[in-house]
Image (cartoon, helix red, strand yellow):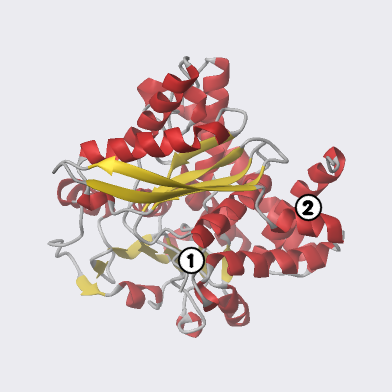
C-alpha cells in the first residue's frame, strides 16, 4: 500500500470529500467551481536529511499542502507524527479552508507534517529537522502566502525555530510568518487556551439550543493534551461534572466527578495519566461509549466510525480533534439524535486567535488577554449561530451546514476573483 494513502472509511481526504460533495450539491455549486475547490492549490513533499546526535544521518519526509488561498494566505498547523500521510495533510488543509471561512477570518487552508516520532528525538535533532524542513518549504511560506502554527507533536518552541529560520533567509525579523509563538516573540495572549475556550463556548451555545443546564450535565473528554485539559477545565467551571478524561495510556473515570485541577497538576508533573488513581481505569474506546450528556473527542481523527457510532450515548458531541467522526458514522449519529458541533466550527477557536496573533504582529500592537477573550467570544458565538441557522434553513445536519457555510464563502470569493488563465 502507498504509505501516503489510507484506504476505506478512515481515509481523511475521502471523508472530507464526502462532506464537501454533499455541501456542494445542496448549494447547487457550479461544476467549474466544484472542480476548483475540490483539489488543493499546491502540494510540496520534501526530503529532510538530518545529522543525528550519534553521528549517523537519517532522512525524514515532510509535506506542506496549500488547499486554498482564495480568501487569504494559507493557514494551518504542522504536525510531527509517525502516522503523517499526504492524504491526511490534504484533508487537514481542506478542513482549514472551510474552518477559516466558517469563522470568517481572511485565511485559506494549509497544513504540514513531518513523518517522525518527536518523543524519540533529542531537542537538537528536533531543531535540525525543523530548520531543514523550514528551509525546504520556505519558498511557499510567508506572512502573505502561508502561515504555519503548532499541531500534534509541535509547540511554541518549534514555531520559534521556524520563524527564526525563515527570518534568516529573508534577512529580516518576520514574526508574522507563524502563529502560536511564545508571547515574548510576538505570540498572542490567550492563544494556548483558545481551542479549548472555543469548544466550551460552542458547548454552552449548544446546551442552550437543547435547553439543558450545564450544572445538570456530565461530560467525558477523550484527550488530555492542551485542548482536552483546557476544555475540561472550562466545562468544569461552567458547572458540568467531568466524569472521564483520557490520554494515550487510557482513561480515568469517576461517576462522582473528577477534580480537573488535580488532573492538570498530575499531567504537568508526570506528563501522563499513569499513576493517577482517583478513579477507575478504562480504555479510550470505552470512554467514547459512556452514558454522558457531553462527549468531547479531542485526541485524534477516526475515533467514531461505523463500528462504534451506534454505541454513542451522549446527547451532545463537541469535536475537539480534526476529523474524529468518519463520514459513514455521520448518518448513524444523526439517526441517534446526537447534536453534533462539527470540528470545523467547534475547534476553530485556535485559528481565530491565530488570526488575532497575525494581526497583532502585522501592526506591531498587542491586545490584553481580556480583549482577546472578548473578540473570541464574539467570533465563536456568531459562527455557531450562522451554522445552526444554515442547518435549519436547509434541513441538514450541523456538519453539512458548516461545510455549506464555508464552501459558499470560499466559492463566493473565488467567483469574484475569477479564473486566471
User: What residue is at 34 percent from the left and 59 percent from the top?
Assistant: 82
- Quadrant of residue 303 in the image? bottom left
Q: Is residue 210 visible?
A: no
User: What residue is at 48 percent from the left and 63 percent from the top?
Assistant: 4
Q: Earlier in the sequence, mark 1 or mark 2?
A: 1
**Count of numbered marks:** 2
Q: Is residue 321 visible?
A: yes
Looking at the rendered structure, the secondary structure element under dot 1 is loop
**Which is more toward the observer, 87 or 275?**
87
Report the residue marked by disc 2.
408
User: What residue is at 57 percent from the left and 51 percent from the top?
Assistant: 93
**Which is more toward the observer, 17 or 329?**
17
Report the residue marked by disc 1.
324
How far separated are the C-alphas under marks 1 and 2? Answer: 24 Å
Q: Which mark is residue 99?
A: none
Q: Is residue 338 above or below residue 205?
A: below
Q: Residues within 10 Å of mark 1 (few under 14, many from 20)?
A: many
Q: Quadrant of the C terminus?
A: top right
Residue 304 appears left or right of 256: right
**Which is more toward the observer, 376 or 3?**
3
- Quadrant of residue 3 in the image? bottom left
Residue 237 appears left or right of 400: left
Q: Position of residue 37 (x, y in %)?
A: 73, 54
Q: Position of residue 26 (x, y in %)?
A: 81, 67
**Which is more toward the observer, 218 or 13?**
13
Q: Is residue 78 above or below residue 87?
A: above
Looking at the rendered structure, the secondary structure element under dot 2 is helix
Q: Position of residue 396 (x, y in %)?
A: 73, 69
Q: Residues within 10 Å of mark 2 (few under 14, many from 20)?
A: some
Q: Quadrant of the N terminus?
A: bottom left
Amino acid at each position: 500500500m502507498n504509505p501516503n494513502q489510507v484506504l476505506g472509511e478512515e481515509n481523511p481526504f475521502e471523508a472530507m470529500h464526502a462532506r464537501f460533495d454533499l455541501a456542494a450539491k445542496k448549494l447547487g455549486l457550479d461544476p467549474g467551481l466544484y472542480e476548483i475547490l475540490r483539489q488543493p492549490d499546491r502540494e510540496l513533499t520534501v526530503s529532510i536529511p538530518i545529522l543525528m546526535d550519534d553521528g549517523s544521518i537519517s532522512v525524514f519526509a515532510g509535506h506542506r499542502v496549500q488547499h486554498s488561498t482564495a480568501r487569504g494566505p494559507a493557514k494551518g498547523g504542522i504536525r510531527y507524527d509517525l502516522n503523517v500521510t499526504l492524504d491526511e495533510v490534504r484533508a487537514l488543509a481542506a478542513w482549514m479552508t472551510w474552518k477559516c471561512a466558517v469563522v470568517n477570518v481572511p485565511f485559506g487552508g494549509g497544513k504540514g507534517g513531518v513523518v517522525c516520532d518527536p518523543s524519540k528525538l533529542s531537542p537538537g535533532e528536533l531543531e535540525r529537522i525543523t530548520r531543514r524542513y523550514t528551509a525546504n518549504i520556505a519558498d511557499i511560506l510567508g506572512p502573505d502566502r502561508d502561515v504555519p502554527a503548532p499541531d500534534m507533536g509541535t509547540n511554541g518552541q518549534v514555531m520559534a525555530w521556524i520563524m527564526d529560520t525563515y527570518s534568516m533567509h529573508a534577512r529580516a525579523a518576520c514574526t508574522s510568518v507563524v502563529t502560536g509563538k511564545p508571547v515574548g516573540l510576538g505570540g498572542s495572549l490567550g492563544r494556548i487556551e483558545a481551542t479549548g475556550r472555543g469548544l466550551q463556548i460552542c458547548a454552552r451555545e449548544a446546551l442552550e439550543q437543547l435547553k439543558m443546564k450545564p450544572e445538570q450535565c456530565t461530560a467525558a473528554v477523550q484527550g488530555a493534551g492542551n485542548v482536552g485539559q483546557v476544555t475540561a477545565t472550562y466545562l468544569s467551571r461552567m458547572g458540568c461534572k467531568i466524569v472521564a478524561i483520557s490520554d494515550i495510556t487510557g482513561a480515568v473515570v469517576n461517576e462522582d466527578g473528577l477534580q480537573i485541577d488535580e488532573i492538570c497538576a498530575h499531567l504537568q508533573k508526570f506528563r501522563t495519566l499513569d499513576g493517577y488513581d482517583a478513579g477507575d481505569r478504562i480504555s479510550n474506546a470505552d470512554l467514547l461509549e459512556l452514558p454522558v450528556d457531553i462527549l468531547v473527542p479531542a485526541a485524534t481523527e477516526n475515533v467514531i466510525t461505523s463500528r462504534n457510532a451506534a454505541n454513542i450515548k451522549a446527547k451532545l458531541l463537541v469535536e475537539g480533534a480534526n476529523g474524529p467522526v468518519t463520514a459513514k458514522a455521520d448518518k448513524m449519529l444523526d439517526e441517534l439524535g446526537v447534536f453534533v458541533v462539527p470540528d470545523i466550527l467547534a475547534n476553530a477557536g485556535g485559528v481565530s486567535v491565530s488570526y488575532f496573533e497575525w494581526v497583532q504582529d502585522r501592526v506591531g500592537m498587542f491586545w490584553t488577554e481580556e480583549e482577546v477573550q472578548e473578540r473570541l467570544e464574539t467570533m465563536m458565538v456568531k459562527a455557531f449561530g450562522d451554522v445552526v441557522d444554515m442547518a435549519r434553513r436547509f434541513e441538514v445536519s450541523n456538519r453539512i451546514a458548516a461545510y455549506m457555510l464555508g464552501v459558499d464563502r470560499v466559492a463566493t470569493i473565488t467567483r469574484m476573483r475569477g479564473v486566471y488563465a
